[in-house]
Image (spheres, grey):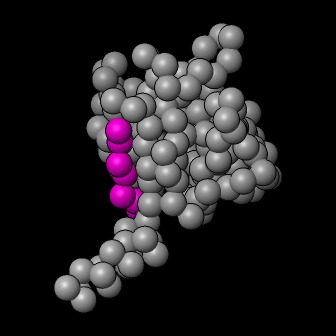
Amino acid sequence: MPIQEYPFLLPTKEGIKIRCPNSLPMLWIRVINPANKIAVVVPALIDTGAISCAFPASCASKLGHDLRSVPHKKIITGNGVTCAFPHTSIVQILNIKPDGNPDITKILFTINEQLIDYTEGLDAFLLGQQNFLDKFILSINYPQKKLSVRYPHSPIEKKIKIKKRRH
């Protein structure tokens, strides 16, 4: 199911704001540890500059992952060199309610079991190229503070191609 006109989000201490001046291209996600089914629901930033998805290391224990039970890898971030610990996770993209909060009953996309880097020193959940952006076509409308996501061969694209062939 394509995501159409998902509003930009701005998490604040008071709650979530949508389409405000400092809001960002974010999606509500549910991260699940497939081994024990423990899950968290969080806003995640779409980061076209990130090579892969990266989540805060502090979230690993909440999901029941033993952070240091796997070999770490050194990665370079905007804040310098840090350690990342890959753990298998499921990521579900959730619908959004009109007030900006997640609709946990409506899953728009599921990214099945993938290795996600749980990264030391990271505060935000980042949806990067590998395991997320490389699966979709992303359209961002900054002036209107909204984004759209769809699979490369969605029914909408197929209809457009069919119409073009007839002309």
Q: Is residue 100 left or right of residue 105?
A: left
Q: Let me know if residue 137 is in the magenta part.
A: yes
* Outermost residue toward the left in this view: 167
Near-viewer residue (118 or 44)? 44
Near-viewer residue (116 or 19)? 19
Q: Is residue 23 left or right of residue 166?
A: right
Q: Report the residue at 37% width, 51% height from top.
A: 138
Find residue 40 and report its horizontal and vertical position in percent. Answer: 72, 38
Q: Report the residue at 35% width, 38% height from top.
A: 141
Find residue 97 and report its horizontal and vertical position in percent. Answer: 69, 38
Note whether 24 is above or below 31 in the view shown: above
* Outermost residue toward the top in this view: 13
Find residue 59 and report its horizontal and vertical position in percent. Answer: 65, 32
Q: Report the residue at 34% width, 32% height from top.
A: 142
Find residue 50 and report its horizontal and vertical position in percent. Answer: 34, 39
Near-viewer residue (163 or 79)? 163
Please identify the quarter of the rendering in which residue 136 is found: bottom left
Q: Total number of numbered labels? A: 0
- Report the quarter where the C terminus lies: bottom left
* Outermost residue toward the bottom in this view: 166
- Range shown magenta: 135-141
Query: Is residue 13 something one can see in this rendering?
Result: yes
Note whether 40 is above or below 163 in the view shown: above
Near-viewer residue (8 or 98)? 98
Please identify the quarter of the rendering in which residue 166 is found: bottom left
Q: Is residue 152 left or right of residue 7?
A: left
Query: Is residue 121 something one can see in this rendering?
Result: no
- Report the quarter where the N terminus lies: bottom right
Q: Let me know if residue 104 is in the magenta part.
A: no
